[in-house]
Image (cartoon, coloured by chain):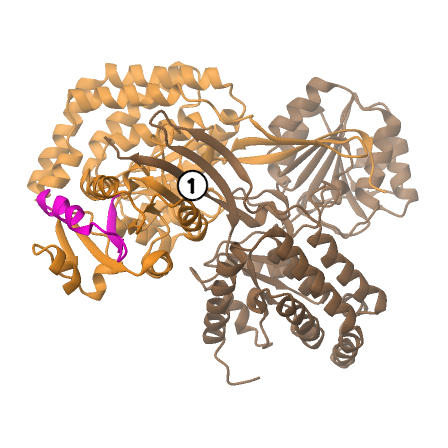
Chain colours: A brown, B orange
Amino acid sequence: MSGIDPQSLMNELASRARLAAIRLAGMASAKKAEALRAAAAAIRADSAAILEANATDMASGRENGLTAALLDRLRLDAGRVEAMASGIESVAALADPVGQVIDRAERPNGMVLTRVRVPIGVIGIIYESRPNVTADAGALAFMSGNAAILRGGSEAIHSNRAIHAALARGLDEAGAPAHAIQLVGITDRAAVGAMLQSEGLIDLVVPRGGKSLVARVQAEARVPVLAHLDGINHSYIDGAADPAMARDIALNAKMRRTGICGATETLLIDRAFADPAPVLAALADAGCELRGSAEIRAIEPRAVAADEADWDTEYLDSILAVKLVDGLDEAMAHIAAHGSHHTDAIVTEDAARAERFLAGVDSAIVMWNASTQFADGGEFGLGAEIGISTGRLHARGPVALEGLTTYKWVVRGTGQTRP
Amino acid sequence: MSGIDPQSLMNELASRARLAAIRLAGMASAKKAEALRAAAAAIRADSAAILEANATDMASGRENGLTAALLDRLRLDAGRVEAMASGIESVAALADPVGQVIDRAERPNGMVLTRVRVPIGVIGIIYESRPNVTADAGALAFMSGNAAILRGGSEAIHSNRAIHAALARGLDEAGAPAHAIQLVGITDRAAVGAMLQSEGLIDLVVPRGGKSLVARVQAEARVPVLAHLDGINHSYIDGAADPAMARDIALNAKMRRTGICGATETLLIDRAFADPAPVLAALADAGCELRGSAEIRAIEPRAVAADEADWDTEYLDSILAVKLVDGLDEAMAHIAAHGSHHTDAIVTEDAARAERFLAGVDSAIVMWNASTQFADGGEFGLGAEIGISTGRLHARGPVALEGLTTYKWVVRGTGQTRP
C-alpha cells in the first residue's frame, strides 16, 4: 500500500463521504435501520473471513511483541463477532434524532420558524486495537445520518478490512450508499495527520482510545474534536452521608471496573463524616491501594503516603487517592483545582448541600448519591455512545446519536419581506 | 502600554475571568439583570466622558487617514451612547437560558437525570472599529453567565476604555464581579494572537467583523471559534412562484440593505418561471447591477456579463449575480457548489418542491417564500445576537443567549451502584 499520498487519499475519502452524507441526510429512519440490519447480517455471514483476518493480525501482533492486554483487545472470537452484529442491530433499533423538531415559533409577521435536527456531515473516527469499534462507530455515525471515515490501529488492519468489507456490502445490498462507512485502508501513520488537517472536508473527529491518542489528536487537529482526555473523577463523602451508602458507593465507584473513564480516582471525605474507617477498610479489603496523608493512614493502616501528583492522576487501576476535607467548600475547591470536568459525585443526606454541589461543580456529569461508574451513554438510556466529551461546546458527557447531529433553521413564509 | 507581554496579559485576564465566571454561573437571573441595568445607567452617567474619549479616537482616525466609512463606524454621538445603554437594558430583559432543564428522564433503577443549561465559561470577543460592540457583546456574554474578554479595534481604544470603565463600575456597584467583562487594554496586535492560542483558558472566541478578521481568527485559533466567513446567499425563483411575490422578495432580499450578511448575492431563476423580466427590471430600477449570461442580458438589457467568479462572490453591495436554471435540482446543485451554508431561500407556490428545497439545502437557515434579509437573531425572536454561525457544531445560524450556553448532566440517586 506504499506510494499513496495520505492527504490525497484523505481528500478522496472525504469527497466520497460528502456525497454519501448528502444521500444519507435525506434517508428515512426505517431505511437506515434496514441497511444497518443488512450490515449486521453481512457481519454474521462473513464471520469466518473476519476471524481468519483477525488470526493474521494476532499472529503479527505476537511477532511484534504486543502486550497480553493489547492482544486481548485485538482478539476476536465467534462471540465477539456476534456481539458486533447484535450491537449494530441495537443501534438500528434506536430512535433516529434526524428530523426531530427542537422548537417552533411563529413570528408576528406570520413566518413560522422551526429548528430541525440534521446530521453533522462527515465524521472521522480514530481508534486503536479493538476491531469492534469499526462496527460500533460506523453504525452510530450511519444511524445519525453521517458518513464515517474510520481509522483503526495498524495492528488490526486485516480485521478492520474484513469487518468493513462486510458492512459496506450489507449497506450496498440494502440500497444505501456504501461510501457512508469508509475505512482508511493504509496503515501509514501520516493518514491520521491528514485526517486532522482536513478542515472543511471532515466536520468532526472522534478519537476513541487512550490518553496519548486523544492528546495527539487534540494537539494536531484543525478539525473540531469530540473527546475527553482524562477522567479524574471525585466522590465526596459529606458529613451528612449515610455510612452504609457511602461505603457501597465508594467501593463501586472505584472498584467495579477500574479501567473505565467513569471510575472514581479521588475520594474526598468530610472530617465531619463519622465513619470513614469502614469505607477505607472495604476498599482495602477489595484490593485497592489507598494513598493519603498520615491522618488517612491512621484510619486505615494499609494506606500508603500520597504525594501532590496523586491528586492529578487518572490511575485507571486499583489505586485511590484519599483526602480529608473540611466540608463542602473545600471539596468543591479541590475538584475545581484537580478535576477534569468529567464526572463528580457527592454522597449526602443533606439536600441543600447536594444541590450546592450539583450547581457548583463544573463537570459534564454531576451526581448525588450514585456511583460515578454510571457515567455511560447506555446507563443514561441513550443507547450506545460514540464517546464521552469533556469539551464545553456542542455535546457534553455521554455522546450518542443526538450528539452526532446539529440543526438547521427552517423558515416558512407567505411572501414576507423585511421592512 | 509597551513592555507588556501579550500572552502573560492574556493569561492574567483569563484567570480573573475564570474566577468571575464561576461567580456568575451561580448568579440568579434577576441579579444579573439588575447588574446590567446598573451598567446601562453608568453608560448614561458617563456619556460626556465616553464622547470625549471618542473625540480623541476620531481625531487620531482622521490623522491616520481612516476612510469615511470607518470613521462613521467609529463615531459616537449622544444618540449612539443612549442606544448602547438601552441595548444593554434590552439584553437585561431577555429570558435567561441558564438553569433551563433541556430534558429529564428517570432510569429503571430510580436515578433521575436532567440536562441543565449552564454558561460556557470564558468568551473572547474580537471586533473592529464599532465601539458599541463593547457594550452589546459584553452584555450578551454577561446575561448568559459568561465572563467576556473584549478586544476591540486599536482605533477605538479610548472609546472602548471609557465604555468599559462605565460597564465595570456599574457591575461593581450592583455587587457583580467587575472582571466578568474585561477589556484588553493594550493595542498590540499580538494580543489577538495570544487570545487565539489560549486553549483551555478561553472556551470560545467570537470574531465580529469583516471577512479578513474572521479568516485570520479561523486560521490561527486553537480555541473554538463561532463565526461565519461568507454569506453567499441564494434566492431561487421556482417555476411555480407567484410573480409579484418573486419580484418583491428578490428586491428586498438584495436591496433592503446590501451590506448585511443575510443579503442575497445570487438570484437563481427557473427557466419555467414565466415572468423574469419584471423581477430584473425592478432590481435594475432600484440601482442594482445585474450580472448574468447572454440569456439574462436579453431579458434585462441593463445587465452586464457575469464570469465564473461571480457565483462565489459576496458583494455586500448593489450587485447581483443572476442565473437561469432548469428547475429545482439544478438550483440545489448550484447552491451546494457555490453557497456558504448561511441562508438560502426558495420562492414557490408548490409546497412539495419547497419542502424538498428546505430538506435538501444544507444551510444554517433555509427559507420558503421569505426574504433572506430576515436572517437575524432579532427577527427570529431571539433578542440580540452575538453573531451568525455557519459552523456545523454547537450553534448554527443566529446565535443569541442560548448559543452562549452549554449543558451539564445532573444525576440524582438514592444510593445506586452499578451492577
- How many tags in the picture? 1
Letter of the chain that mark 1 sits on in the rendering: A
Describe residue B413's horizontal placement relative to residue A173 as left or right.
right
Residue A164, given in percent of the width and then of the height, sits at 66, 71
Residue type marked 1: Val
User: Along the horizontal axis of the image, is B155 left or right of A394?
Assistant: left
Q: Residues within 10 Å of mark 1 (few under 14, many from 20)?
A: many
Q: Quadrant of residue A188?
A: bottom right
Residue located 74% across and 56% down the image: A89
Instruction: Quadrant for the C terminus of chain A, please.
Output: top left
User: Vertical placement of A90 versus A65: above or below?
Assistant: above
Q: Is residue A75 visible?
A: yes
Question: Could you say which is closer to the camera, residue A310 or residue B256?
Answer: B256
Vertical placement of residue B224 versus A322, above or below: below
Over which residues does the magenta segment extend? B263-287
Nearest to the observer: residue A333 or residue B358: B358
Q: Residue at x 51, y 60 (%)?
A: A23
Query: Magenta stretch: residue A19 in it?
Result: no
Q: Is residue B269 magenta?
A: yes
Instruction: Name the one closer to the observer, A132 or B75.
Output: A132
B185 in relation to B235, above or below: above
How far from the left and from the top, in percent, is residue B244?
A: 22, 40
Q: Quadrant of the N terminus of chain A?
A: bottom right
Residue B223 seen in the figure: no
Dot 1 lies on which element? Answer: strand
Q: Which residue is mark 1?
A: A410
Whole-percent x and y of residue A51? 79, 75
User: Would residue B241 appear left or right of A15 to someone viewing this image?
Assistant: left
Residue nearest the viewer, comparing B77 with A83: A83
Residue A229 horizontal/vertical position (percent): 61, 51
Residue at 31% of width from left, 53% of height from top?
B216
Q: Is residue A295 above or below residue B197?
A: above
